[in-house]
Image (cartoon, helix red, strand yellow):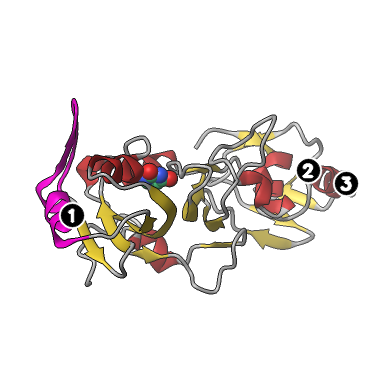
Amino acid sequence: MAAERIDKILSSQNIASRSGVKALIKAGKIFANGQLVKRPEEKYDPTATQFTVDGQPVTVQQYHYIMLNKPQGILSASRDQHAPTVIDLLPEEWKRRDLFPAGRLDKDTEGFILLTNDGELSHKMLSPKSHVYKLYEVCCDRKLTQEDVQSFAEGIHSGEQVFLPAEMKITGEYTALVEICEGKFHQIKRMFQTIGAQVVHLKRLKIGGVWLDKNLSSGAARPLTESEITALLDRKHGIES
Ligand code: URA
């Protein structure tokens, strides 16, 4: 891994804020590979260096994976001058980790968004070739029928645009669960428009094999567990499963 400044490395691990790490360096409390660290500008390979802070070893976690229950009205971006973003919702200590949203949810869509600094995993999760399915709960403005289910199963065509076959399960007169493995711009809304329905509410419930945590209130976030990180790229699908 590329070398980074020691204050950046340790603040990303929740040891202290950047100024807190500088103070620890000044107090002579930080060692890298057994050598006293003298300046915050010193650079180290974060995963190939043994750090101690106040005599305690620090294990550097290179990648971070955070599940956020995105509320409506929040942008899926790292920063924006005018509107709050998903990163703005995180606790201060997680904001220092160069996290970005892996994929986008529309401003008025809520639910599961993954925040990570792992570009490779993000790319795999979003590529249709990886067959990682995403499950959405949809409410629309007209009654849904078995013909709609059939249209989705056959694949929707909208002008030049072709959407791959998708599973829809009707859950109420106006509501359904829909599973897709592509992530085209406004995809669910456009698929419904093609069958003559407007989406009035949209929530993402699942990515790969990972469900949105039911205990995570709107706007709250938590790190994924080890097994959830592995399950993100799960290719199993089927709404019943
Ligand atoms: N499809 C949409 O139309 N919007 C989203 O936010 C996600 C999927």
Front of the two marks 2 and 3: 2
**Residue plotted at (53% across, 42% down):** 107
Q: Read off the residue under disc 3.
A: 23
Q: Is residue 76 left or right of residue 165?
A: right
Establish if 193 lies above or below 71.
above
Ligand 1 location (quadrant)? top left
N-terminal-most mark, 2 or 3: 2
Q: Are marks 2 and 1 in contact (CB under 8 Å)?
A: no
Establish if 61 lies above or below 119.
below
N-terminal-most mark, 3 or 1: 3
Q: Is label 2's Cβ within 8 Å of ligand 1?
A: no
| Helix, strand or loop status at disc 1 | helix
**Residue plotted at (58% across, 53% down):** 60
Residue nearest the observer in this picture, 75 or 132? 75
How busy is the neighbourhood of tag 1: few (under 14 within 10 Å), some, or many (20 plus)? some
| Helix, strand or loop status at disc 2 | helix
Front of the two marks 3 and 1: 1
Residue nearest the observer in this picture, 234 or 11? 234
Q: Is residue 184 visible?
A: yes
Q: Read off the residue under disc 2.
A: 18
Task: Report the amino acid beneath label 1.
Answer: Asp
Q: Read off the residue under disc 1.
A: 148
How busy is the neighbourhood of tag 2: few (under 14 within 10 Å), some, or many (20 plus)? many
Task: Report the amino acid beneath label 2.
Answer: Arg
Q: Are marks 2 and 3 in contact (CB under 8 Å)?
A: no
Q: Position of residue 52 (x, y in %)?
A: 70, 56
On whether residue 188 falls in the magenta region, the answer is no
